[in-house]
Amino acid sequence: IESLVVCDVDEDLVKKLKEFRFRKETNNAAIVMKIDKDKQLVILDEEHEDISPDDLKDELPERQPRYPLNEQPYQHDDGRVSYPLCFIFSSPVGCRPEQQMMYAGSKNKLVQTVQLTKVFEIRNTEDLTEEWLREKLGFFR
């Protein structure tokens, strides 16, 4: 059995994620992260402003895992609006097992490093919709 590789998080990415967490803008935004296999590091893949979950899913590779971190306004039942950071582990069916394992093994490290609380997983990029995300966020009232 291959030993589980847990990748470190690139220092520049950690800085960027902290900035992202405390950003003042109120629009939808996302940061997509990937693993640099040779360096065994989680690194920045893409940044998006004004992107809906439905558009974000089109940016994710269908056959490779990614870690999108999405922030968008969320209207609560009482009218309050919050801006939750949603970390999504996208690990599509059909990606290579060793890639799958590397991403799965590194996910917790990344979540802990950035102190994320809303962590979701999708097995099919098509599942990433605004509706799906709202439903998931509904559990965090």
Image (spheres, grey):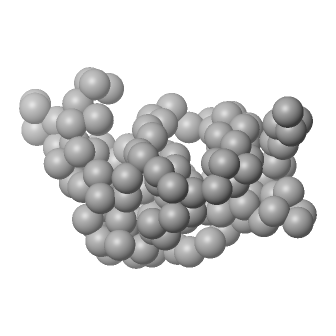
Q: Position of residue 52 (x, y in %)?
A: 28, 66
Q: Position of residue 96 (x, y in %)?
A: 64, 56
Q: Position of residue 128 (x, y in %)?
A: 31, 54
Q: Position of residue 120 (x, y in %)?
A: 43, 38
Quadrant in which the C terminus is drawn: top left
**Residue 123 horizontal side relative to residue 20, left or right:** left
Q: Quadrant of residue 15?
A: bottom right
Q: Quadrant of residue 42?
A: bottom right
**Residue 48 horizontal side relative to residue 1, left or right:** left
Q: Quadrant of residue 115?
A: top right
Tell me if residue 117 can be seen: yes
Q: Is residue 87 above or below residue 44?
A: above
Q: How many marks?
A: 0
Tell me if residue 72 can be seen: no
Please report the residue visible at 48 percent of the width from the left and 36 percent of the height from the top: 119
**Residue 41 horizontal side relative to residue 108, left or right:** right
Q: Is residue 120 above or below residue 85?
A: above
